[in-house]
């Protein structure tokens, strides 16, 4: 996976950082992996600081009044297209977020028309964003981030107990009071076209981390054995690692260590 970080050295938020980050990502396009369909990629995305001005305006249009930055979290969620099953997941979220945080508000839902080819449309998710307010018992952003991490795991656990994760159509891309991620299984030049939010003038950040996934090395197989597609092999391996981190062989200690390392990395970036 190829990553590039773009930031304002004085920490000033602007929309130009987002524009420059997308341009940098497009310059990485030749390193990205593609399948038989030349317009179907292995994935590209961008991580930014929560664009408060943008969400304050958009939430206001929906009748939601957002608190100050750091006192609410934004989650980017891939949801199933089945409305009944999606409603089940939406009902789980407020119940599980009530402890230590205000009940969640799911908003800005959209079934986007994908810009790529027909080969990837069957797996395109229904996109939603969730807003979660910081409860009065949470005294710091660090404490809020810890509770959000646990909340994300709890909701995923409840959801996957109701339906196998491979069939659930549910995945939390990000859930944080500090950062937000937009990503998908497409090429670098499709990211900005797919997410129009990234072109709004008040969508501002002081740093942006972009990535494009590259095809991993496929090991040699026995003579006559079918050679798996690199993307599928990588996905299966990643799923195995994630199952370990979610409570399997890796255990809670490793999960905690990874979480601390992730937070330290974000602190260094900010």
Image (cartoon, grey):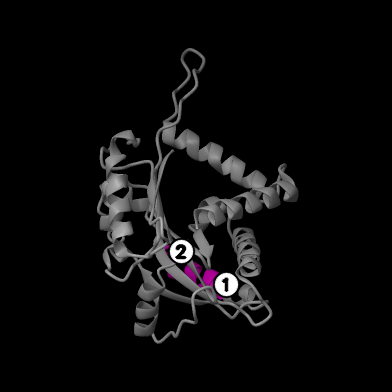
**Residue 141 relative to residue 126: left or right:** right
Residue 188 visible in the displayed image: no
| Mark 2, other Cα within 10 Å: few <14 / some 14–19 / many ≥20 | many
Q: Which residues are magenta?
A: 79-92
Question: Between 173 and 138, which is closer to the camera in this rendering?
Answer: 138
Which residue occupies the foreground of this view, 81 or 29? 29
> Distance between the Cα atoms at labels 1 and 2?
13 Å
Residue drawn 49% across and 75% down?
Answer: 69
Number of marks drawn: 2
Q: Quadrant of residue 129?
A: bottom left
| Residue 58, percent from left and from top | 35, 78
Which residue is labeled 1 in the image? 93
Q: Residue furthest top?
A: 223
Determine the main secondary structure of the stretch shown in magenta. helix
Say left or right for 166 vs 40. right
- In reply to whether residue 82 is colored magenta, the answer given is yes
Disc 2 on helix, strand or loop? Answer: strand
Q: SS for tag 1? A: helix
Residue under label 2: 76
**Residue 77 pos. (x, y %):** 47, 63
Q: Quadrant of the N terminus?
A: top left
Of callouts 1 and 2, the N-terminal one: 2
Q: Position of residue 98 (x, y in %)?
A: 64, 78
**Residue visible at 56% across and 75% down in the picture:** 91
Q: Residues within 10 Å of mark 1 (few under 14, many from 20)?
A: many
* Vertical side of 227 occupied by 99: above or below: below
Identify the mark at residue 217; answer none if there is no mark.
none
Answer above or below: position of 23 versus 204: above
């Amino acid at each position: 996976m190829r990553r590039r970080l773009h930031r304002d050295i004085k920490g000033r938020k602007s929309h130009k950082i987002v524009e420059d980050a997308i341009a940098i990502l497009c310059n990485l396009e030749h390193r990205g992996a593609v399948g038989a369909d030349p317009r179907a990629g292995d994935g590209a995305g961008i991580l930014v600081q929560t664009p408060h001005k943008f969400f304050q305006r958009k939430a206001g249009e929906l009748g939601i009044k957002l608190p100050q930055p750091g006192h609410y979290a934004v989650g980017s969620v891939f949801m199933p297209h089945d409305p009944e099953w999606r409603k089940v997941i939406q009902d789980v979220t407020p119940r599980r977020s009530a402890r230590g945080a205000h009940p969640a508000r799911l908003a800005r839902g959209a079934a986007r028309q994908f810009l790529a080819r027909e080969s990837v449309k069957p797996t395109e998710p229904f996109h939603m964003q969730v807003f979660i307010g910081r409860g009065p018992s949470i005294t710091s952003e660090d404490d809020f981030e810890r509770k959000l991490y646990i909340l994300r795991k709890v909701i995923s656990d409840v959801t996957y107990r109701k339906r196998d994760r491979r069939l659930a159509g549910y995945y939390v891309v990000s859930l944080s009071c500090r950062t937000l991620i937009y990503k998908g299984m497409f090429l670098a030049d499709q990211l900005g076209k797919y997410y129009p939010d990234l072109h709004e003038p008040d969508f501002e950040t002081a740093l942006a981390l972009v990535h494009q996934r590259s095809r991993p090395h496929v090991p040699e197989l026995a003579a006559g054995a079918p050679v798996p597609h690199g993307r599928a092999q990588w996905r299966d391996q990643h799923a195995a690692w994630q199952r370990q981190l979610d409570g399997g062989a890796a255990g809670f200690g490793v999960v905690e260590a990874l979480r601390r390392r992730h937070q330290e990395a974000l602190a260094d970036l900010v």
